[in-house]
Image (tube, rainbow, N blue to C red):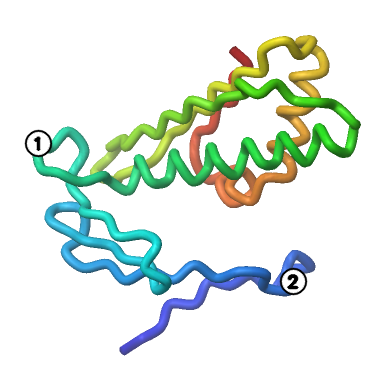
Amino acid sequence: MSQLDERRTTPHDGKVVYTARTHTTGGRENGVSRSSDGRLDVKLSVPGSARIGTNPEQLFAAGWSACFESAIGLAARKRKIVLPADLAIDAEVDLKQADGAYLLGTRLNVSLPGVARDVAEALVEEAHQICPYSKATRGNIDVAINLV
């Protein structure tokens, strides 16, 4: 078995604080993905399918939006700002096809009700710099972050 290793050898290498492990069979067509700790056990299906199951784009949207919300919380704590209980992020992940290749595009629609617009914009911008998903996608896919 060959190994594809694309680890970066930049100053960003650091101490591993957590490793998620999953085992997936069947791909997006008729797949199943399970985590090593048993907490995730999902059926997979293609987008728009009537088959029971989620798809990788939905999982990516859920993961990124959860991480981004936590990054907003970190930015707010640093500024001693109390966030509203109804803070929400609606994530949209587009699966696109161009020139025979598949690509992703994303939108994070962030709702911070009751927070002054300039403060909310600063929190969202700082979160985009903090969030590991934002860092991983920066310059690789189309990303729009909207304050709604």
Q: Residue at x 35, y 40 (%)?
A: 58
**Mark 1 vs mark 2: in front:** 1
Q: Which residue is mark 1?
A: 50
Q: Quarter of the image containing the N terminus?
A: bottom left
Residue type highlighted by circle 1:
Ala
Name the image quarter holding residue 51. top left
Q: Secondary structure at mark 2?
A: loop
Residue 115, placed above or below residue 131: above
Is 86 or 54 nearer to us in this picture?
Answer: 86
Q: Which residue is mark 2?
A: 14
State the residue lying farthest toward the left.
Answer: 50
Residue type highlighted by circle 2:
Gly
Q: Residue at x 74, y 71 (%)?
A: 14
Tell me where residue 113 appears, x and y as whole percent.
67, 12
Is 59 or 134 nearer to us in this picture?
Answer: 59
Name the image quarter holding residue 4. bottom left
